[in-house]
Amino acid sequence: MTLPVPGVALAEHRPLVERLSDWGYTDLWTAEVAGADAFTPLAAAATWSSELRLGTAIASVFARGPALLAMQAAAMADLAPGRFVLGLGSSSPMLVEGWQGGHWDRPYARVRDTLHFLRRALSGERVDADFETFSIRGFRLERPPSTLPSTMVAALLPRMLALAGAESSGALLGLVTPDDVPAMRERVRSAGPSAEIGIRVGVYPTRDETAAREHCRAVLAAYLNVPTYAALHESLGRGEQLAPIREAWNAGNRREAVERVPPEWADAFFAIGPPEACRERIQEFVERGVTMPILSIMTREADPAGVLGSLGPG
């Protein structure tokens, strides 16, 4: 499950987190866009559950310096020894440059270098080295974790998928259909035969499927204009359908861009409908090779416990 759940204040999540294991959930993962950061909800959850695995999906390598990432990962590993996974990714130019005032450049190299730095820093080593995309002078963690956290990489394109398999414990996919998964899984597993394949699946449990699909088309119109997502879906053969969406979006015609998203894409990319239909859709991702589906609730509900309980695997 993705934390926080929409419409629930973070301080009010404890009763939900305490029941997740009973509903069949094994993990809690955070997203990091413009709401909660990737680490704070997990720190709270670590005190509410001693069973759930906790992971960032993702913490941006451009939003924090390498040393701060090491300190945050070490603190989480101290709070939840053996249960914390540091999911890393490059985010996007809009978030890094438009929102953070940073510079999004050479994302593959930055993620690779960050992985290499963290491997040394989290082991307690003093790091004094020049990496390809940054240099570190004399850094050593004051509190290296007794149990090293696992790492995973947010990956869509071939080189990043291979990096995830070769240099981490697995890949975190996003905004793809079940039919897209096998080829992506193969690229990861060819570099790391035992690599985990995670994916965040947008879940819209509702009886009003028409409104849900319109919401999901709006989400697609925005995300498919992010360069990495656009490049992925062009490579997957959706370029002809994607071109008019991007043309309208880049011209500032957002409503027209949403209207140009093929209606069938909502059901292809998301799980929409009654809880039982959503569970069946999630199972399709598993059947295509996903080992860890991460549910992301896309609607606010009056009864969040009922929603989470009805979507859980039991």
Image: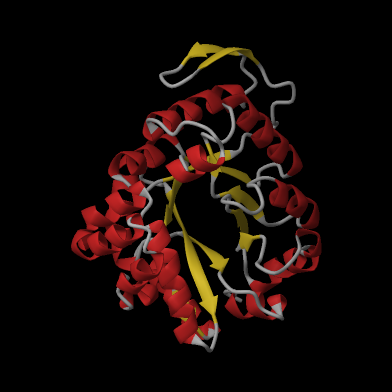
- Residue lying furthest front: 252
- Residue lying furthest bottom: 207
Q: Is residue 273 above or below residue 224?
A: below
Front-most of residues 249 and 25: 249
Q: In this rendering, would 267 be left or right of 62?
A: left
Front-most of residues 130 and 265: 265
Instruction: Name which residue lies at 60% across and 52% down.
Output: 34
Q: Is residue 165 above or below residue 288?
A: above
Q: Quadrant of the C terminus?
A: bottom right
Percent across and percent down for residue 172 are: 45, 51
Q: In this rendering, would 163 be left or right of 14?
A: left
Q: How many marks?
A: 0
Front-most of residues 207 and 54: 207
Q: In this rendering, would 207 be left or right of 239?
A: right
Percent across and percent down for residue 85 are: 59, 44
Image quadrant assignment for residue 93: top left
Percent across and percent down for residue 264 are: 32, 78
Image quadrant assignment for residue 213: bottom left
Q: In this rendering, would 275 be left or right of 264?
A: right
Q: Is residue 36 visible?
A: yes
Instruction: Name which residue lies at 63% across and 70% down.
Output: 24
Q: Is residue 26 visible?
A: no
Q: Quadrant of the N terminus?
A: bottom right
